[in-house]
Image: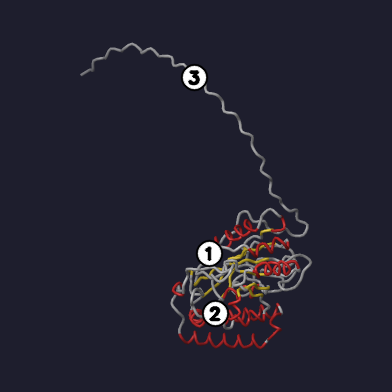
Amino acid sequence: MNGPWDVWSDCTPDCAAHALPRVPATRTARRGAAFARCVRRALTDGERMADPVRLRAHAASLLDALGVRIEGAAALTAGDRVGDGSGPGSGIGNGVGLGPGSGLGTVNGPGLGAGPGPGTLIVLNHISWLDILALLAVEPVTLLAKREVGAWPVVGGLARRAGTHFIDRTSPRRLRHTVREVSELLGSGRSVAVFPQATTWCTADRGSFRRATFQAALDAGAPVRPVTLHYTQQGLPSTVAAFCGEDTFAASLRRVLAARALTVRVTAHPVLNAADGFWDRRELADRAARAVLGGRPEPGAVAVPGPGAVPTLPVPAFPVPEVAPVPEFPVPVVPVPAAPATPETPARV
């Protein structure tokens, strides 16, 4: 344990495995060359890559070069309307909208821009370095990541240029400052994406959520959007994208380049409205974890209403008074006289 947000995972590089036969070596080589070209273009963009449109385009190009598709509908439509993350859409792969105002952005404004209301705290499970590219391809929000991510090859450089805020998990004193910083970002209308598991796991149903960043949502009155990332190969669950334990980026990249029909599905669950004040950070984190790690919408989630909608408030449960038990009275037992015996009738032959 290196700090308050450091978590130990029992997943290792041995967890990463192909669900389908690898693609031919020639295709792997072509993917590698295309990926290298996309990385060079992204890095030469410099500070301009922080622009949401350019950032989304670079992330989508990198995934396309790797042969990785994205599935899943956009979580939020334009303006204040909230989708359920289940309907068809357009964009790369199947159903992810990449146009302005689509994706997992804020409730009141684009992903990196400041809107009139608070931004959205997007909480995701963490499996791979591909998670970052998948999220940015859907909606280029501000990322909150551990400091070690900044040292990752390729992804670290992209994350720094994208304006990622890095967490120093070795300093407990920085925890309160980080929560305040995230709260200020949300309050300014910017959406922030975090990985509350604090480490990577090989599947989408492992680990638990740390609660500190949920306090930032409560302080800012910001909605929380649970999102599940799930990797498949032709519909089969796959761990080939997992980047766990002592795995190296080079080894993980080789597996991804050789993966056949690798797809990341982005499932957006209904928004949890932290501004209602019904939950503390423990309850908010637990509800988000049940939605994300369970891979299905949390029944108790509250969708953010659209303009003019009347919010639905939970009906308080009133205590039911206890009814005094009815006393039992002894019931006398009356003997029933036996009927006279009937003579047997001889059987006829």
| Mark 3 vs 2, N-terminal side | 2
Residue at the farthest left position = 349
Residue 152 position (above or below residue 1): below
Q: Quadrant of residue 112?
A: bottom right
| Mark 3 vs 1, N-terminal side | 1
Residue 181 image point, x, y percent: 71, 70
Nearest to the observer: residue 197 or residue 16: 197
Going by the image, does 82 lie left or right of 267?
A: right
Nearest to the observer: residue 198 or residue 267: 198
Residue 103 image point, x, y percent: 67, 70
Residue at the farthest top position = 340
Residue assigned mark 3: 330
| Mark 1 vs 2, N-terminal side | 2
Residue at (48% x, 81% y) in the render: 251
Q: Amino acid at mark 2?
A: Gly
The C terminus: image quadrant: top left
- Of tags 3 and 2, the one toward the viewer is 3
Residue assigned mark 2: 67
What is the CA distance from the residue labelled 1 to the residue labelled 2? 28 Å
Residue at (73% x, 53% y) in the render: 311
**Color theme of the render:** secondary structure
Q: Amino acid at mark 3?
A: Pro
What is the CA distance from the residue labelled 3 to the residue labelled 2? 81 Å
Residue at (61% x, 65% y) in the render: 227
- Could you classify mark 3 by the number of other residues whose Cα lies within 10 Å: few (under 14), some (14-19), or many (20 or more)? few
Residue assigned mark 1: 207
Residue at (71% x, 84% y) in the render: 48
Residue 223 image point, x, y percent: 69, 62
How many numbered discs?
A: 3
For label 3, the SS is loop
